[in-house]
Image (cartoon, helix red, strand yellow):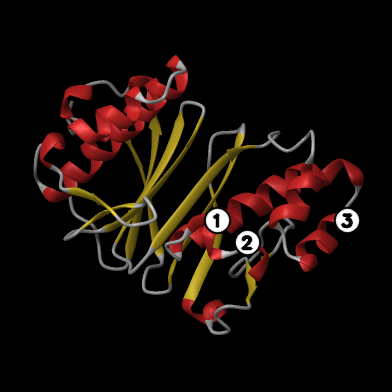
Amino acid sequence: MRLGRDEIALWTLDLAGCAAPECLSPEERARADATLAPEPRRRRIGARVALRRVLGGYLGVAPAEVPILTDPLGKPRLERGPAFNLSHSEDVMLLAVGDAAAIGVDLDLRGRLDGDWRGVARTAFSEDEQRQLEAMPEGARAEAAVRCWVRKEAYAKARGAGFAYGFKSFTVRTAEAGAGSLLIEDLQDPGATGAWRLRDIDAPSSFVASLAHSRDAARIQHRQLSELNP
């Protein structure tokens, strides 16, 4: 497989169909075994197997031979090869692989914040984002909060820090996506709105998802695990 210039391949993967744990490294197996509940353990293994299968396709090596490294914040990366980022919820996983300096992707269930969206907003959302949500009709706020969370996660992951980036220090749009980037402001990086792009992406009907990437990539190609050789 090859990536086109300025292209991001967005893989939608079913973790229920990802087996072959023998391709995992001893460290990956140990981390999975540390997960006591059976379903999270199965999904953790499936996500890592899927990641190795896809990256192996781009690198031209067997899944077990993919040289995945981990940075100090726990983010997996390749020393040489395309940028990538993944997110999974339930049995759905999104994996973005691209010809870009940096990529972040996030996926979540639409109803995850139905119980206490305000609690999450107070902890993680900027004051402007909270005002945007409060201005919406009551019935729209919980799902909009999930969209806001997913957009913020994707951007913070692209910046390489995840939640440690400081979720209150930047602002995204909370309304339905329109034209242009969803990033409004980043107090840590005043030039971010011109250097980064944040957009919503297609996901299965029960989920919402967003993708953030540096401006040197623009085209998205949707891919499925069935395109890989078993």
Residue 228 at least partly seen: no
Of residues 23 and 9, the one drawn nearer to the viewer in this rendering? 23
Q: Residue at x 16, y 29 (%)?
A: 23
Dot 2 and dot 3 residues touching (CB under 8 Å): no
Foreground tag (1 vs 3)? 1
Quarter-wise, where is residue 81 in the image? bottom left
Name above or below for residue 88 compared with residue 128.
Answer: above
Earlier residue among tags 2 and 3:
3
Residue 5 point in image, percent of width and height: 26, 67
Residue 218 point in image, percent of width and height: 41, 67
Residue that extends furthest to the top in the rendered view of this protein = 38
Earlier residue among tags 1 and 3:
3
Residue 86 at least partly seen: yes
> What separation in Å lies between label 1 and label 3 (alpha carbons)?
23 Å
Which residue corresponds to mark 1? 163
Which kind of residue does numbered mark 2 sit on?
Phe
Image disc number at residue 153: none
Dot 2 and dot 1 residues touching (CB under 8 Å): yes
Quarter-wise, where is residue 180 in the image? bottom right
> What separation in Å lies between label 2 and label 3 (alpha carbons)?
18 Å
Q: Residue at x 32, y 62 (%)?
A: 7
Image disc number at residue 167: 2
Which residue corresponds to mark 3? 134
Secondary structure category for the residue under label 3: helix
Which kind of residue does numbered mark 3 sit on?
Glu
Foreground tag (2 vs 3)? 2
Of residues 146 and 166, the one drawn nearer to the viewer in this rendering? 166
Which kind of residue does numbered mark 1 sit on?
Phe
